[in-house]
Amino acid sequence: MSQLGGGDDDGDIVLEKKPVVGRARRWCVVFYNDDYTTKWFVVHVLEQFFHMTETTAASFMMAVHEQGRGVAGMYTRDIAETKAAAVMDYAREYGMPLKVTAEPDERG
């Protein structure tokens, strides 16, 4: 423990640091375009797993189709990985080669 006041013996002063509370890093659930998964299957998945309206899901699907990839949502790591895995499992059940990944948010 340290003393303040140049050796004053009337008592030690203990300084406590406040704990630093940071935000958990966000993870993106990323959809990738492919030439085989039907557009309407992607819309269905977005409605079912990401609770998008049909209009929002269709717009997102078209953006992924045109840009090659798109972020469907931002979550904590475990939720993003769980969602990505659930979508991939569902797609495989229906014979669709849809690729969905969980990736760290590059913005920090």
Image: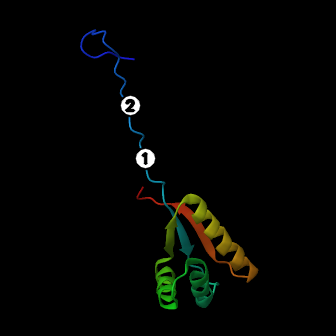
Element carrying mark 1: loop
The reply, left or right, for residue 27 in relation to residue 44 is left
CA gap, disc 2 and disc 1: 15 Å
Q: Position of residue 33 (x, y in %)?
A: 56, 78
**Disc nearest the viewer among 2 and 1:** 2
Could you tell which of marks 2 and 1 lies nearer the N-terminus?
2
Q: Where is residue 77 in the image (x, y as percent from the top left)?
A: 56, 59
- Which residue is disc 2 drawn over? 16
- Image quadrant in which you'd find residue 81: bottom right
Question: With respect to residue 91, does 80 lie above or below?
Answer: above
Q: Position of residue 73 (x, y in %)?
A: 50, 71
Question: With respect to residue 104, does 62 lie above or below?
Answer: below
Report the front residue among 32 and 78.
78
- Which residue is disc 1 drawn over? 21
Q: Residue at x 71, y 73 (%)?
A: 89
In the image, what residue type sits under mark 2? Glu
In the image, what residue type sits under mark 1? Val
The reply, left or right, for residue 92 in relation to residue 39 is right
